[in-house]
């Protein structure tokens, strides 16, 4: 509506030389004149993605082995071409056709029963809408269920039919740089939640869709298991021509359902039991973590303090939470080595060593559920297909909203994107890309708003509204220290020097937020997004009628303070509460500091917490810190804003009973001891664990 109103202004369309006068006419041009994807044909979809000029710098045509050392002893797993599946597939193809190029095809379905293809790093294409009929005309429930499953596999087989010949014989394909290669698109892996895995692999519910472990041993950490025998299953499926009874019996002996020609039966080099990939969203976040939270809540209601061995029970619960969260974050690393895979295995073992506590408390009587057993396959799948971001159900969970619920607008957007790519290609404006293995660093850019949030805040207001109690003293100490950098100042000497500093101003311009934007470290052309922020806001009174007052907010942050030393891998860092972010104007800086040592123009007032101890708490793995108090007063200082690394989340040490007057708005003032939360996000986990 706003766009049409703009174009309705007299002369706008003519001056801009537009061929449309409102949004309706623009949408008509998009629908009728801009081309979209070719009409559906699986092989054409792959050819189009493979030949897209935007992907030319991101395509990989051969498997690789990455190592951390020159002796090639520690291998790295990151993108799919660094996994063993691609190597094994390449070897098989080279025996038949030397020099052939493997194109991995990742198939995903979700609850709306859509299929997606991902043969490159960011290409998700909707291939088909599968029927969701319940076949109500079949009154027998068992027959209806079998027919529904057979219908699913028949539709999937029809969609993936072109892969049979293309995978075996290959086809000549031109990449975006014009080079022709003989390519073999191969079904690599299947992405879906547990019901979809069961449906696809044709195993029975409650069984593992990948291996032969009995359902009553899913909770075991020691039971032996093997990936299901594909050849045995394929032999059973061939008996369908012999007779119904023999077919059903053969399938039963092979531990699968009697499904008529599963879609993967004829796909070359495919092993469906190997192709089932980990599902972090449903197995961990919505599975184990959700279960664990409910069990812990029940344990609290039961009252751990009223059971024998209460302290032991509490420690076990701590360790269970820690081990599961360790596993969750380790499983999402973008690059794995032998060391990180060992840590993943240790976290899982620690969980199994302590899970019995919930049985002892009477909260749960067994752990025979597939989500827990699936964690035993994570390490082998990472070695096979590399890191879990290569086959993440979160992608398609998000896509099904766009593709199924807003298909019309998505189609228009797709046409616009295609047209934009064509224009860039014509202008030779495609950015270059230099691939490199990912690492565990979190590159980000710190930013402030262009203009201050408040232009003149008095020192008294900083004390009363921003809780910057010692702002004047901290600023004079900062000025004195910066003017005597060549001198090792004692606390007394610094205090005497600060007493002689006269500030030529009594107010400063302040900012209420620091943001960190993501950095496109991999050169994928990813848009910049806000990944972190620190808020520093005084209380907002609001209006009396609506009672919409907002409490003050002064966030805590991890700060690079070179005066703090410890033997930790994050040496030199300390936690502080940010109470004020202010601008030191150039004329004031010139009057206070020598020309050779002008300070940054953005500074911040920080109230400190004590340095990190040498080791974290042995139960939950978090570091304990307290408010840094000297002579009964909080220790505070002025530092450059650039020293702030990221926001940090602190968990109060509640004690046996949580004080009822503590709230999220006052806990930083009411509580003095905190634990640094290393599980709030992946950045904190990598930093503190």
Image: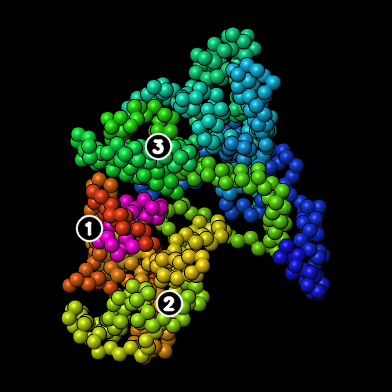
Is disc 3 placed on a helix, strand or loop?
helix
Residue linked to disc 3: 291
Residue linked to disc 1: 613
Using the image, determine if residue 299 lies above or below residue 179: above
First reached walking from the N terminus: tag 2 or tag 1: 2
Residue 678 among those drawn in magenta: yes
State the separation of the CA atoms marked 1 and 3. Answer: 33 Å
Q: Position of residue 383 (x, y in %)?
A: 43, 38
Task: Locate residue 537 relative to residue 50 in the image: left or right.
Answer: left
State the separation of the CA atoms marked 2 and 1. Answer: 33 Å
Q: Which residues are magenta?
A: 666-689
Task: Locate residue 284 relative to residue 246 in the image: left or right.
Answer: left
Residue at the farthest front position: 545
Q: Position of residue 329 (x, y in %)?
A: 39, 46
First reached walking from the N terminus: tag 2 or tag 3: 3
Do we see residue 173 in this rendering?
A: no
The residue that appears at 19% across and 78% down in the rendered structure is: 491
Residue linked to disc 2: 510
- Circles 2 and 3, Cβ within 8 Å, touching? The answer is no
* Label 3: few (<14), some (14–19) or many (≥20) C-alpha neighbours in 10 Å: few
Is disc 2 placed on a helix, strand or loop?
strand
The residue that appears at 40% across and 77% down in the rendered structure is: 582
Task: Locate residue 492 relative to residue 246 in the image: left or right.
Answer: left
Is disc 1 placed on a helix, strand or loop?
loop
Using the image, determine if residue 32 lies above or below residue 259: below
Q: Nearer the viewer, mark 1 or mark 3?
A: 3
First reached walking from the N terminus: tag 1 or tag 3: 3
281 and 600: which is toward the camera? 281
Label number found at residue 122: none
Residue 245 among those drawn in magenta: no
* Label 1: few (<14), some (14–19) or many (≥20) C-alpha neighbours in 10 Å: few
């Amino acid at each position: 509506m706003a766009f049409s109103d703009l174009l309705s202004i007299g002369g706008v369309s003519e001056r801009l030389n537009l061929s449309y006068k409102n949004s309706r006419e623009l949408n008509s041009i998009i629908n009728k004149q801009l081309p979209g994807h070719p009409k559906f044909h699986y092989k054409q979809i792959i050819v189009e993605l493979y030949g897209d000029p935007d992907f030319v710098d991101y395509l990989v045509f051969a498997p690789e082995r990455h190592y951390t050392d020159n002796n090639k002893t520690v291998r790295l797993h990151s993108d799919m071409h660094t996994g063993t599946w691609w190597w094994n597939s390449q070897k098989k193809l080279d025996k038949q056709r030397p020099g052939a190029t493997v194109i991995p095809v990742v198939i995903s379905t979700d609850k709306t029963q859509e299929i997606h293809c991902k043969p490159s790093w960011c290409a998700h294409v909707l291939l088909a809408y599968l029927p969701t009929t319940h076949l109500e005309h079949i009154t027998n429930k068992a027959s209806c269920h079998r027919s529904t499953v057979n219908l699913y596999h028949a539709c999937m087989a029809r969609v993936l039919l072109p892969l049979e010949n293309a995978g075996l014989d290959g086809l000549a394909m031109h990449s975006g740089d014009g080079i022709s290669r003989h390519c073999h698109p191969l079904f690599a892996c299947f992405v879906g939640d547990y019901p979809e895995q069961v449906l696809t692999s044709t195993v029975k519910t409650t069984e593992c869709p990948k291996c032969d472990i009995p359902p009553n041993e899913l909770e075991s950490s020691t039971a032996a298991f093997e990936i299901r025998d594909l050849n045995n299953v394929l032999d059973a499926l061939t008996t369908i021509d012999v007779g119904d009874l023999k077919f059903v019996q053969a399938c039963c002996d092979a531990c699968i359902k009697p499904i008529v020609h599963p879609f993967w039966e004829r796909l070359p080099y495919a092993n469906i039991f190997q192709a089932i990939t980990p599902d972090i969203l449903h197995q961990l976040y919505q599975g184990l973590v959700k279960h664990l939270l409910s069990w812990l809540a029940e344990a609290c209601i039961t009252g751990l303090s009223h059971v024998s061995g209460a302290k032991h029970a509490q420690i076990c619960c701590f360790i269970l939470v820690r081990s599961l969260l360790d596993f969750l974050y380790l499983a999402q690393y973008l690059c794995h080595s032998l060391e990180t895979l060992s840590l993943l295995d240790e976290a899982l073992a620690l969980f199994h060593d302590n899970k019995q506590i919930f049985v002892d408390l009477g909260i749960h009587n067994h752990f025979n559920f597939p989500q827990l057993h699936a964690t035993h396959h994570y390490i082998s799948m990472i070695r096979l297909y590399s890191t879990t971001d290569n086959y993440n159900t979160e992608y398609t969970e998000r896509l099904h909203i766009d593709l199924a619920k807003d298909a019309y607008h998505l189609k228009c957007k797709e046409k616009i994107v295609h047209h934009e790519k064509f224009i860039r290609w014509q202008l030779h404006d495609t950015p270059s890309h230099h691939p490199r293995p990912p690492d565990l660093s979190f590159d980000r850019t710190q930013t402030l708003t262009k203009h201050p949030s408040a232009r003149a805040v008095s020192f008294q207001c900083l004390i009363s509204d921003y809780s910057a109690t010692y702002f004047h003293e901290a600023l004079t100490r900062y000025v004195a220290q910066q003017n005597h950098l060549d001198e090792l100042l004692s606390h007394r000497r610094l205090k005497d020097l600060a007493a002689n500093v006269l500030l030529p101003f009594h107010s400063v311009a302040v900012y209420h937020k620091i943001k960190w934007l993501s950095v496109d470290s991999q050169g994928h052309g990813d848009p910049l997004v806000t990944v972190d922020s620190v808020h520093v806001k005084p209380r907002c009174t609001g209006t009396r009628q609506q009672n919409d007052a907002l409490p003050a907010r002064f966030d805590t942050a991890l700060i690079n303070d070179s005066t703090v030393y410890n033997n930790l891998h994050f040496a030199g860092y300390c936690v502080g509460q940010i109470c004020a972010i202010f601008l030191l104007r150039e004329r004031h800086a010139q009057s206070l500091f020598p020309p050779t040592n002008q300070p940054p123009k953005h500074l911040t007032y920080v109230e400190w917490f004590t340095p990190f101890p040498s080791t974290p708490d042995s139960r939950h793995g978090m570091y304990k810190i307290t408010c840094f108090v000297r002579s009964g007063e909080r220790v505070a200082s002025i530092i450059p804003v650039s020293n702030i690394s990221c926001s940090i989340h602190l968990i109060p040490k509640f004690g046996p009973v949580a004080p009822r007057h503590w709230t999220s708005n006052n806990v930083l003032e009411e509580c003095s001891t905190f634990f640094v939360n290393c599980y709030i996000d992946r950045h904190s986990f990598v930093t503190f664990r």
